[in-house]
Image (cartoon, rainbow, N blue to C red):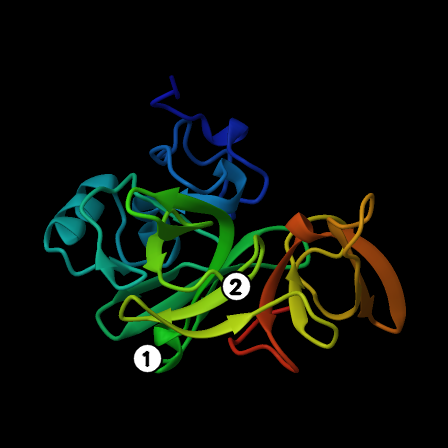
Amino acid sequence: MSKRHLKSIAAPKSWPIKRKEHTFIIRSNPGPHKLENSMPIGLILKILSQVRTAREAKQVINQRKILVNKKPVTDIKFQAGLFDVIEFADNCYRILLNKRGKLIFREVSKAESNILLYKVIKKTRLKGNKLQLNFHNGFNLLVEKDNCRANDVLLIEDNKVKDKISFEKGNTVYIIKGKNIGKTACIEEVYENPPLNKHITVSIEDRRINLPKNCVFLVGKTKPIITLSEK
């Protein structure tokens, strides 16, 4: 059973908070994202200076005007994670990582807020021989054709697949773990056979490095299709 409380001093290092300002901090409900790659929506609103207290956050959220990936949020402990898009009023933000491994909220345009990236983590065969794709953010989608692999990323709009980004030479990835966190890189080689079939080689800053596939997130083909920050 997960804990219901969290001390600020014990919060994940990726959270951009002042740890000695308050003893306790909002803890997000369990969800698809890891704790270090997500934050509760009530805390995000405070960081973005939209509310000052948890009570104000509840009042705003109860109006169902806070959207995460185009869906209204109803709980201040709702977990918003990496690459999720948060919308309220006329503001849109995408959750990313900076080079210090801190979660940041990159402001994006209304048009770009429609670009939602979903990483395939598993495929499930359902009753009636239907195929369901399971994504990193808890979203599921029924598809007719089995043309995706684990770690592929889909661009989805209105519950329909608009494009697919696969692990292929020349495609662009965003590094989400390790000492190169928060940087983009280009795929140089994809290994198909064991024991390296879970790794890829990428070029970054005139260097070639080998990374596990779970340390990167596909963000485009020849270039990123979303706005990224590498500060």
Disc 2 is placed on an element classified as strand
Which mark identifies residue 153?
Answer: 2
Q: Position of residue 57 (x, y in %)?
A: 22, 47
Q: Is residue 179 left or right of residue 213?
A: right
Q: Residue at x 83, y 72 (%)?
A: 205
Query: Residue tagged by mark 1?
Result: 110
Front residue of this view, candidates 51 and 13: 13
Q: Is residue 144 left or right of residue 136?
A: left
The amino acid pointed to by label 2 is Val
In the rendered image, which quarter contains the C terminus?
bottom right
Q: Position of residue 48 (x, y in %)?
A: 37, 59
Front residue of this view, candidates 94 and 48: 94
Which of the 4 quarters of the picture holds residue 165? bottom right
Disc 1 is placed on an element classified as loop
Q: Residue at x 42, y 64 (%)?
A: 145
Front residue of this view, candidates 122 and 95: 122
All told, the count of numbered labels is 2
Circles 2 and 1: CB atoms closer than 8 Å: no
Which mark identifies residue 139?
Answer: none
Residue ranking furthest to the right:
207
Q: Is residue 114 left or right of residue 122?
A: left
